[in-house]
Image (spheres, grey):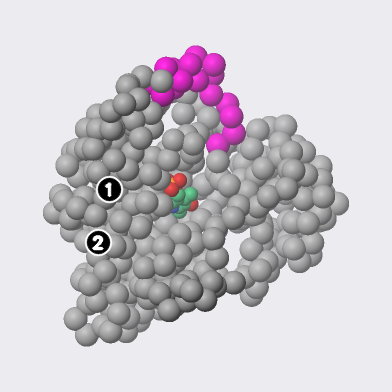
Amino acid sequence: MTAPRFAHLLRPELADLAAYVPHTGDHEIRLDGNEAPPLLSSNARAGVAHALAAGGLERYPDPRATELREAIAAHVGATPDEILVGTGSDEVIALLLTTLSQPRAGADAATILTPSPTFVMYRLSAAARGIRVLEVPLDERWDLDVAQMRAAIEAGQPNIVFLATPNNPTGNRMSEDRIRAVIEAAEGALVVLDEAYVAFAPASLAHLRHVYPNVAMLGTISKIGFAALRIGWLVGPVELIREVDKVRQPYNLPTPSQRAATFVLRELRAEIDHVVAHVVGERERLGRELGRLGFGVSPSDANFLWVETKRPAKDVFEGLAASKILVRSFHARGGRLANRLRITIGTREENNRLLEAIARWA
Ligand SMILES: *Cc1c(COP(=O)(O)O)cnc(C)c1O
């Protein structure tokens, strides 16, 4: 309910938004957030704990995150001045939207374009800033519909086109030739390729950044085991990074997060590879087993499965919740999402518990 005292001051778009409240309740197994299973060795954990504790409490963090940007640059094959770091890629998305919000010539509002379904933060973050959101449905294989995307770019003159690949919640990568076609059609816009799940995929599209001047990449350590640190980044042309950096709060990254993330990227490559290999192996096994039970499972290059249920997804979701297992359901969105669940890959035991519980709903 809106407090009448402030009603005249509120941005009208807020009427359609709700605060993001992750599912509550006493679930024993949470396969809803695309986080990594807790498989880090105790040595690695001790190293992260040491990094978290280093640095004085009284001083503000390094406002330029110099060491962390160097570590990210080495990790992604860029230079530090091509990197901007945020409290998760969520913050980077918000900073981009604030920075690039001048309506295009001939457009009556700043606009973003995304395929649908995709990561919800593009839409929510844009709406909160009064930026118009255009959505183009993915095709029947959850790949880009280039003709419709082109038409939307032509008609809507977007400032930014967001493409997540692998995509959340569908798990697949977009075809590279289709991505290229969209980038070429969106010459006057920034195209953001969000590779939050690239660790679980066979290849990155980072090379496109060197082919097209209107491309920037998003990355994060949230999905590979370090969601608690809230570290995500943008890799892009120096002249873009410089402008976005003006919008960033100088002390957006706490010292413990900067130090721990630097340690993670420099020292824990082998550990991360081990966790990723587990997730990929379990993803293939869980996919096969769910298929055997009669569920439709889309090919996934991410750390989750996009599962088609024969019964309404709401029933399966609630049945699993009764077994204290939380997954993500999209039934509220209706249409072709009414019978879809997104299931994060967990530990072997968690995945077995899920299989046991979901069998009843096949
Ligand atoms: C989870 C996710 C993110 C969010 O990453 P953070 O760095 O944790 O903010 C970004 N993009 C996509 C597509 C995601 O699924």
For the stretch drawn in magenta, the main secondary structure is: helix
Q: How many marks?
A: 2
Please check the rendered image and state whether residue 155 is part of the magenta-colored stretch, yes or no: no
Which of discs 2 and 1 lies nearer the camera? The answer is 1
Disc number for residue 249 = 1
Within 10 Å of the Cα at label 1, are there few (<14), some (14-19), or many (20+) other Cα atoms?
few
Residue furthest to the left in view is 239
Residue 312 in the image: above or below residue 299: below
The residue under the point 26% across, 69% down is: 101
Separation (CA) of disc 2 from disc 1:
13 Å
The residue under the point 30% across, 66% down is: 160
Left/right of residue 138 with respect to residue 318 in the rendered view: left
Chain part drawn in magenta: 36-52
Within 10 Å of the Cα at label 2, are there few (<14), some (14-19), or many (20+) other Cα atoms?
some
Left/right of residue 103 with respect to residue 289 in the rendered view: left
Measured from the top left, where is residue 289 in percent x and y? 73, 44
Regarding residue 339, the answer to whether it shows in the image is yes
Q: Nearer the viewer, residue 344 or 95?
A: 95
* Quadrant, the C terminus: bottom right
Which of the 4 image quadrants contains residue 279?
top right
Q: Nearer the viewer, residue 19 or 316?
A: 19
Label whose residue precedes the other's in the sequence (2 or 1)? 2
* Quadrant, the N terminus: bottom right
Measured from the top left, where is residue 335 in percent x and y? 64, 75
Note whether ligand 1 is within 8 Å of mark 1.
no
Residue at label 2? 99
SS category of the residue bearing label 2: helix
Residue 219 in the image: above or below residue 93: above
Measured from the top left, where is residue 174 in percent x and y? 43, 59
The residue under the point 51% across, 26% down is: 274
Q: Disc 2 residue type?
A: Thr
